[in-house]
Amino acid sequence: MAIELNDDLIGLQRAADDAHAEVRRLQEEYGRPTQEGGWTDEQHAAWNAAMAVWRERADEVQQAITGHAAATGQDRGKLEAAVKTAVCHSTPDGV
């Protein structure tokens, strides 16, 4: 049986990936929080806010995958892998 995807799942995964990219961008920009001088309070706040968004987006995509798998009778793990593969091999505009 072929895995059945929908645009909502792909959009949610893209949003989670984008949120993760922002966390990584901040980490690269700020350096290690344990470095000499550490991070400013503003940097800690920005990083914590980005982490909160990433956790929320990741939870949303996981819940959607679980729900879609249950509704369609698909294997949840295979569905999640197919979503991630589809996102990695496509562009946001579908080209």
Image (cartoon, rainbow, N blue to C red):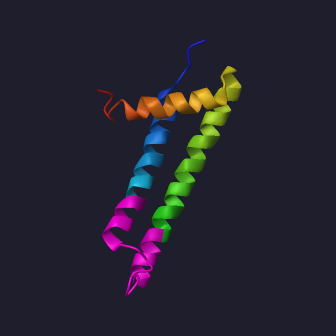
Residue 61 falls left or right of residue 87: right
Residue 31 belongs to magenta span: yes
Whether residue 8 is visible: no
The boundaries of the magenta stretch are 23-47
Above or below, comparing residue 13 to residue 26 in the picture: above
Residue 64 belongs to magenta span: no
User: What residue appears at the point 61 percent right and 37 percent down from the top-left corner?
Assistant: 64
Give percent across and percent down for residue 6.
Answer: 51, 26
Residue 88 falls left or right of residue 79: left
Residue 45 falls left or right of residue 66: left
In the image, farthest residue toward the left: 95
In the image, farthest residue toward the top: 1
User: What residue appears at the point 45 percent right and 37 percent down from the top-left corner?
Assistant: 11
Task: Place residue 36 in its image quadrant.
Answer: bottom left
Quadrant that contains the N terminus: top right
Give percent across and percent down for residue 87.
Answer: 42, 34
How many labels sit on residues? 0
Q: Considering the whole magenta stretch, tell me its main secondary structure.
A: helix
User: What residue appears at the point 53 percent right and 50 percent down from the top-left corner?
Assistant: 57
In the image, farthest residue toward the bottom: 37
User: What residue appears at the point 56 percent right and 19 percent down from the top-left corner?
Assistant: 3
Task: Place residue 55 in its image quadrant.
Answer: bottom right
Quadrant that contains the C terminus: top left
- Front-most of 60 and 89? 89
